[in-house]
Image (cartoon, coloured by chain):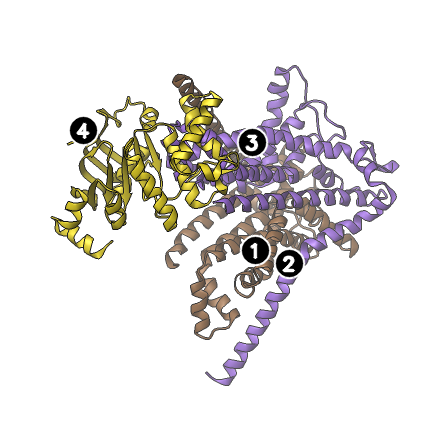
Chain colours: A brown, B yellow, C purple
Amino acid sequence: MKNKKRLEEQFFLWIMRAVTASIILVFFLILLVILQKGWRALSWQMVSEVPEGGFYFGKSGGILNAIIGSLYLALGSTFLAVLIGLPVALGMNIHFVRKKRWVSALRFLLDALWGVPTIVFGAFGFAIMTYFHLRASLLAGIITVTLFIVPIFIRALDEALRTIPIGLLEGSYSMGATKTRTAYSVFFRQALPGFISALLLAFGRSIGDAASVLFTAGYTDQIPHSLQDPTATLPLAIFFQLSSAIPEVKQRAYAAALILTGIILFISLISRLATRKFKKNIL
Amino acid sequence: MSDNIISIKNLKVDAGNAPILKNINLEIPRNKITVLLGPSGCGKTTLLKCLNRLTDLHPQLKVSGQVLIDGEDIFHPKQNITRVRQKMGLLSQKPFPLPMSIYKNITYGLKIKGIKDKKQLQSIVEQNLDDAGLWEEVKDRLHAPATRLSIGQQQRLCLARGLAVGPEIILADEPTSALDPISSRKIEEKFLDLKNSYTLIAVTHILRQAKRLADHIVFIYLGEVVEQGTPDAIFNNPQTAILKEYLQSGH
Amino acid sequence: MTTFSYISRRWTDSISDTWINITTFFLLLLPLSIGLGLVLKSLPLLTTHSFFRLIDSSAWSPMNGHFGFYAFIAGSLSVTLLSFILSAPVCLLAAIYLTQYAPRWLMEAMYFIIDVLAGIPSVVFGAWGVLVVVPLISEYIAPAFGFTSTGYCLLAGGIVLAIMIVPYVLNMLMEVLRSIPVELKEASLSLGATYWETIKWVLLREGKTGILAAINLGISKALGETIAVLMVAGNVVQVPRNVFQPVYPLPALIANNYGDMMSIPLYDSALIFSALLLFVIIIVFNMLTRLLFNRTAKNH
């Protein structure tokens, strides 16, 4: 009987090893394919020019429209998300920290929102657009993306703020500071690494999502000049151009994929480094 | 001198670079209660865990030396460790009932040993719950989850569970520190009962508990055996300065 | 402390206070307004078609006023189920290995891999699926089973989706297993169980609620995933008879047809209705996960 037990353990151990190895293999396979296809497509021209010669039939040009468009979109929506989300997260941990029921209900709500697929936000944004007779534009895109990254930002920041000891709050109050002042000067400084990683998380999500901008931001070969202009985005650049029969158009998709993945990897690297660096100065 | 069931020779345990146990040499007498006494952090729990090789669970611990139980070195690579572990029962500081019913907690170890007959299982369960002083309280709800018991009852359940596999040795790591005074007393009374059939090794930092239970006391400080002897010798006639100071400060 | 700086401090403080209150209130309203907006926009459809007929029928020709969502619901459910079947055992086995057997550096490396995978955008997974998975199926896997397939099918969607949910499910499973106190393992081992027996009978039982929560998380993520599946699933309105046939999940329906929305009557309402369906399902699933996870945390 002992041998049977040993055999069973060995059997499962080998399966587990194989399974773990295959996850790692798939991971590398994904990165390699993106790197290989994207690298070949990448050139200075690709990142510095907008597509030319008509949308789907264009022969030359690059994806600058998508790069700039995505950056505008991500910066705009992240900024708005912080504007709305920072006070809420601080409020949850300072002003309303006594009203435990409300705060847990809010957390519950935010968690529920976190998981809602972005296509729903896109549909909602579109519904609002048609109601107000707006066209697809950078502004509409920014608003829709803000809506879906706000819960993500708040929850991430909230998790970081929750780890701050109450003693810090009390120390600040006892020196006569108001709640708001405590919030912004004391609490916030302590939570800086958490804030940065929440910020970068939101930024990363805002730049990579396709479903939310599909209906709302439009698509164009140009770089947007105003908030009312439609804009291209990197995810949609991949989405629309991947299945083209024209190889030059396909190349743009691969390049966009590489750049997008690169941006996101870069952001998560920075986030890790920043958290590690700032952790030195906190409790 | 009664024969010794456990012989510890040159046992060293390091966690990374920090030494936890430095060169322990110890003999544990059969059918007696041996108490490992000392301040927190002195290594007595680690010593206890070496005795049934629970140190295997902590990869950061490096162990060298020999622990001979009934003459066999349990650290020998060819050793069948599960058989060795079945010779010993463990009672931890906080009771950890397995995530199953009270009944299944006890039959867990039995099923591993290969006992399948239902009547046999039932009688062993009853016997050991009775031995641990828990039978009356749980006989009507044997199949309720063990986590519903009070903490004192859970600790007695863990004792019954450990006894059911028929060990020779019982290892107890601060067994009453999480319990209220009444439950603590019940456990201590059980220990004194069990002495006749088992060897007990208990870790404690409560001086009075050591006085009440022990036949033999081993005082450990900073990973070394400083002094050992009968309770009378230790408490009334301490030899080393460290022990004297420990007895005075009471912790 | 001059009077002037005192006044301006109070002023900025009260503005900030108000802003905090406003934004929190706005947040509480958000899910409600999304739900409300979606319902309002779906009303035209709901008032002219019976709810059950919408769910039940697979006749889909919006130009003729037929809105049967059954094929899409079946599509979503089948691709989610397939991705679950493919990823759940993988994640569980890997989680057990990484938390119980593997050396620490491997576990740490895995966390890094999980982090990166979770960050890769959906559209990039879709592109990868088109480049790697689709040809794999059409050239190797389907013929091996005796089928011909374009590669754009249920299986492709299932595979890509499975890979996408692995980081989330694996991460949660690892957290669950690591949170189980080592003393419980010690108790089992001291009763004579082997390490593997301890894992089977104690660890997995103790982590039951957490494991369910992780599964819940995976399913909810899979249900809502749009773009990647859209790119490899085939998008033909039919209930697939085998895994090599194309499938059309709910999110894909919304994404593919927004252009036609305005030209056909009730089409926009129908698409918003799909979004509403999705919204409700996901929120319910998420709340379940949270409740389950809180219950696990309480038991420790």
- The residue that mark 4 highlights is B3
Task: Give the CA distance from mark 1 to mark 3.
Answer: 30 Å
Q: Nearer the viewer, residue B42 or C242?
A: B42
Q: Which mark is residue A154?
A: 1
Q: Amino acid at mark 2?
A: Leu
Q: Chain of mark 3?
A: C
Q: In the image, which is nearer the foreground, mark 4 or mark 3?
A: 4
For numbered disc 1, what is the local secondary structure? Answer: helix
**Drawn side of residue C270 relative to residue C174, left or right:** right
Q: Quadrant of residue C276?
A: top right
Which of labels 4 and 2 is toward the front?
A: 4
Identify the residue at image location x=76%, y=32%: C71
* Residue found at the very far left of the displayed protein: B239
Tag in front: 1 or 3? 3
Q: Residue at x 71, y 32 (%)?
A: C75
Residue at the disc numbered 3 = C88
**In which image quadrant can residue C58 be found?**
top right
Marks 4/3: CA–CA distance: 55 Å
Q: Of label 2 and label 3, which has the lower sequence position?
A: 2
Q: Residue at x 51, y 38 (%)?
A: B145
Describe the element under mark 4 as helix, strand or loop: loop
Circle number at residue C224: none
Instruction: State whether residue A16 is above or below residue B135.
Output: above
